[in-house]
């Protein structure tokens, strides 16, 4: 495999990559960088944690350094924005900005990152000073365009990162508006870990004869992630999480909740159990979200409880465990979630809590990933406080859609549907299987309306 220095990149980029310890491109980088350097449009699909950001950032910076309209040191030309990267979340936008900073540190290129949830004044000030590249979330970018602070008429490279996430979050109308502000003659790149048909359709509209790069089967989790599930009743999930965190040698642990309110409740419960935890979701201020991420990256990290919107695209090293407290609504999101662990060739654990109403979601995940997920039965110490762990056979039965195998079904003497039907027709109830008559089974006389005989 060739090295970065053999890709004919600008010297300042090669120097920056060496300082970061990058020598050999990852598969997605090795396949994507050459066609991008040639000016081709590209659709890139690869597992999370394989270096997609560098795959588009490095050749884009090379283009800005070596071709096109070079920004002058002053005047109107200095305000030309030549490259635009669109990202679905603030955190991902910030991380892409950090990558652009690291790779261009020995050049005079400048970039800005704009996103909502914070004051736009510092962002506008930086845009007025002039930038070569802009990394943005769609909503804030449209606001700045409408206010006249951003001009996209000189865009040479348009990049959609995590395109499927922007589709799921309803950004497609905004993306269409933004795309219309960009010139038709441009290079367009689209990257994601999954590529559903709707995104393929958009690629056909916005990209011209794109190169297709796919380094792994779509929606295939990394092979070095050990996946397992616990079948558990909903009311016992919080206690199971606490016991699992206390009994297992977990390192940096990321817990996913389906809702913002649920994430806050989990943190509150863990605090009662003397477990340090922090939440990150859309209702948190940007400063609070950045503080939680900083703590999570520290040598003594708390358990980070996140929603899908807040956690998508997080690039944090050494995440040992991902716990799906709630299974996601779509199987594709599951792949993104567990992709937060086992990054850069490391190994990791992905644990999911499955209730009886989430069985069909589990089926969809297994169908998408083409893999049966192991039923966790290796923690007998949990069974004293939590429902008994099912056997593998029981787990298979539960996966097929039956009720939880360890759950005691209450025996009731309520009337059957046929009894209710007979009662409405004025007929006597049928005896129960035991030969007894259920309560209230005696034939009741119909009340006649007043005035009738």
Image: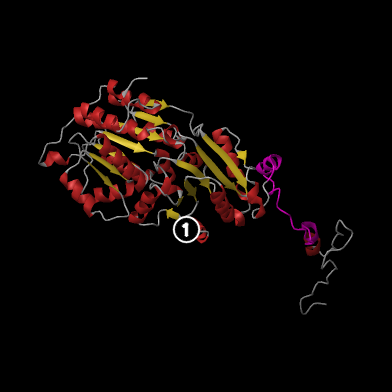
Locate residue 374: give its quadrant. top right
The verdict on residue 41 being magenta is no
Q: Position of residue 297 (x, y in %)?
A: 38, 46
Which residue is at a point 19% across and 34% down the rendered structure image? Answer: 107
Residue 37, placed above or below residue 327: above
Q: Is residue 197 left or right of residue 87?
A: right
Dot 1: within a 10 Å radius of its alpha carbon, few (fewer than 14), some, or many (20 or more) residues?
Answer: some
What residue is disc 1 on? Answer: 264
Q: Does any portion of residue 306 appear in the rendered image?
A: no
Secondary structure of the magenta portion, mostly? loop
**Secondary structure under the numbered disc 1 in the rendered image:** helix
Q: What percent of the width, then of the height, locates residue 206?
A: 34, 33
Write the residue at 20% across / 46% down.
Answer: 127
The residue at the point 18 percent across, 39 percent down is 80
Q: Return the residue nearer the eye: 446 or 291.
A: 291
Where residue 85 sits, quadrant-wise, is top left
Left/right of residue 213 with respect to residue 389 in the rendered view: left
Look at the image and say whether residue 399 sits in the magenta stretch: yes
- Give residue 46's position: percent from left, percent from top: 43, 31
Q: Left or right: where does residue 30 sit relative to residue 125? A: right
Given residues 48 and 363, the one toward you in this image is 48
């Amino acid at each position: 495999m060739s090295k970065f220095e053999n890709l004919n990149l600008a010297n300042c980029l090669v120097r920056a990559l060496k300082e970061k310890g990058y020598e050999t491109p990852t598969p997605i980088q090795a396949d994507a960088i050459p066609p991008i350097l040639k000016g081709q449009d590209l659709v890139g699909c690869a597992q999370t944690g394989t270096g997609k950001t560098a795959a588009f950032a490095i050749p884009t910076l090379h283009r800005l350094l070596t071709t096109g309209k070079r920004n002058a040191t002053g005047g109107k030309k200095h305000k030309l924005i030549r490259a635009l990267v669109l990202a679905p979340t603030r955190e991902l936008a910030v991380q892409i900005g950090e990558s652009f900073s690291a790779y261009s540190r020995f050049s005079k290129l400048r970039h800005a990152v704009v996103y909502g949830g914070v004051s736009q004044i510092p962002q506008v000030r930086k845009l007025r000073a002039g930038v070569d590249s802009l990394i943005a979330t769609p909503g804030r970018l449209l606001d700045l365009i409408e206010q006249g602070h951003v001009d996209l008429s000189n865009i040479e490279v348009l990049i959609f990162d995590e395109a499927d996430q922007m589709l799921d979050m309803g950004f497609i109308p905004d993306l269409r508006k933004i795309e219309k502000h960009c010139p038709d003659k441009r290079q367009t790149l689209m990257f994601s870990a999954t590529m559903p048909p709707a995104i393929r359709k958009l690629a056909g509209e916005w990209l011209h004869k794109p190169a297709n790069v796919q380094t792994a089967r779509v929606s295939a989790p990394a092979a070095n992630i050990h996946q397992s599930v616990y079948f558990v009743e909903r009311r016992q999930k919080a206690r199971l999480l606490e016991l699992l965190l206390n009994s297992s040698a977990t390192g940096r642990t990321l817990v996913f909740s389906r809702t913002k309110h649920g994430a806050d409740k989990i943190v509150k419960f863990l605090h009662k159990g003397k477990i340090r935890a922090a939440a990150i979701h859309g209702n948190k201020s940007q400063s609070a979200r950045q503080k939680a991420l900083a703590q999570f990256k520290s040598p003594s990290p708390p358990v980070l409880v996140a929603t899908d919107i807040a956690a998508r695209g997080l690039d944090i090293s050494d995440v040992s465990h991902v716990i799906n407290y709630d299974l996601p609504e779509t199987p594709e999101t599951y792949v993104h979630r567990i992709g937060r662990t086992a990054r850069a060739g490391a190994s990791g654990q992905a644990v999911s809590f499955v209730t009886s109403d989430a069985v069909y979601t589990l089926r969809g995940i297994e169908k998408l990933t083409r893999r049966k997920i192991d039923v966790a039965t290796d923690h007998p110490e949990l069974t004293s406080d939590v429902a008994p762990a099912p056997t593998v056979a029981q787990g298979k039965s539960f996966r097929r859609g039956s009720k939880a195998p360890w759950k005691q079904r209450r025996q009731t003497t309520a009337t059957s549907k046929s009894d209710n039907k007979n009662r409405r027709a004025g007929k006597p109830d049928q005896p129960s299987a035991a030969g007894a008559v259920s309560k209230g089974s005696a034939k009741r006389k119909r009340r006649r309306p007043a005035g009738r005989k």
